[in-house]
Image (cartoon, rainbow, N blue to C red):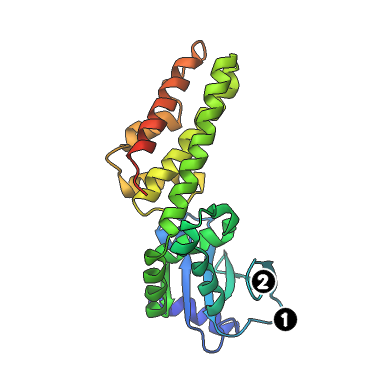
């Protein structure tokens, strides 16, 4: 029995596969092949009717209806977290990142919650168990939307904000704060570079994985890792490291086209 069939059989055996399920897909580290022995298995299931059972929980969402159902089970020692989305809710999220919304100048943070942005990113990288055609249709819609432009704009804005802090802190002699602001700026600009190459996730714990996946010419892994681990940082001369990182952040930002 293949993995797909086994996963679906576990859901059916527990009565957790909705009738008329449009799609069920694994997301997160398991879908990417980045999981380890203690990783949860995260799965999304999409249907036309709200999921209800005697065990489900809820997560609020700024959608209509304003919640998704959740279930948690354990299979062979691994925790499974299931989230039940409505097809209409997915459409609502994609509609939020239309080109007309982008041209209005509304920041993505005012349109999408972190969870909604993550859901769109996960749709692009998921592993379908059933309903692959449905997943492909949503990917086409996302790729035709302004999602990439929204994420890039937000990452660039965050980078600029941190770099402004760096300038002010260096000027005032607050070197310790400048170091922290430079680290934040670097994280945001790495997210920017990755988004420019179609990697939209922003979880810091997966940045090294994403850099390995993309291998951006503008930021080779060795260069990235040296800065991420502060390899050349000299506690006796923090200004030099801060100025080096800030300069790299500016250069990388200028190379990105929205």
Report crowding for label 2: few under 14, some 14 to 19, many 20 or more residues within 10 A (C-alpha).
some
240 in relation to 192, above or below? above
Query: Is 24 positioned to the left or the right of 199 in the image?
Result: right
The Cα atoms of the two marked residues, 1 and 2, are separated by 17 Å
Q: Earlier in the sequence, mark 1 or mark 2?
A: 1
Quadrant of the rendered image containing residue 92: bottom right
The residue located at (54%, 68%) in the rendering is 76
The relative height of residue 191 versus residue 90 in the rendered view (above or below) is: above
SS under mark 2: strand
* Quadrant where the N terminus is found in the figure: bottom left
Image coordinates of residue 13 in percent, x first then y, are: 56, 84
Single out the residue that lies furthest toward the right.
54
Q: Return the residue at label 1.
A: 54
The count of marks equals 2
**Closer to the eye: label 1 or 2:** 2
Question: In this view of the protein, can residue 233 be seen by the observer?
Answer: yes
| Residue at position x 44%, y 16% in the image | 240
**In x, y percent, where is residue 149?**
42, 54
The residue carrying pointer 1 sits among few (fewer than 14), some (14 to 19) or many (20 or more) residues within 10 Å by Cα, namely few
Residue furthest toward the front?
104
Q: Which mark is residue 67?
A: 2
Identify the element where label 1 is drawn.
Answer: loop
């Amino acid at each position: 029995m293949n993995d797909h069939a086994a996963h679906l059989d576990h859901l059916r055996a527990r009565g957790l596969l909705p009738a008329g399920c449009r799609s069920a897909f694994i997301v997160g580290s398991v879908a990417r092949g980045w999981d380890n022995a203690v990783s949860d298995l995260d799965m999304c299931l999409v249907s036309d009717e709200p999921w209800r059972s005697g065990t489900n929980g809820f997560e609020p969402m700024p959608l209509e209806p304003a919640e998704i159902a959740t279930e948690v089970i354990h299979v062979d020692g691994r925790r499974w977290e299931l989230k039940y989305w409505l097809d209409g809710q997915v459409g609502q999220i994609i509609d939020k990142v239309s080109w007309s919304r982008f041209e209005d100048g509304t920041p993505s943070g005012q349109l999408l919650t972190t969870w909604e942005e993550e859901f769109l990113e996960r749709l692009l990288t998921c592993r379908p168990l059933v309903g692959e055609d449905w997943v492909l249709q949503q990917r086409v819609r996302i790729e035709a939307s302004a999602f990439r432009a929204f994420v890039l704009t937000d990452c660039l804005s965050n980078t600029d904000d941190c770099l402004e802090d760096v300038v002010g802190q260096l000027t005032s002699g607050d070197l310790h704060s400048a170091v922290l602001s430079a680290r934040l700026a670097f994280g945001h600009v790495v997210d920017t570079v990755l988004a420019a190459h179609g990697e939209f996730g922003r979880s810091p714990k997966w940045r090294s994985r994403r850099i390995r996946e993309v291998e951006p010419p503008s930021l080779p892994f060795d260069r990235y890792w040296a800065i991420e681990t502060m390899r050349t940082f000299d506690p006796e001369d923090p200004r030099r490291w801060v100025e080096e990182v800030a300069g790299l952040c500016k250069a990388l930002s200028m190379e990105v086209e929205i």
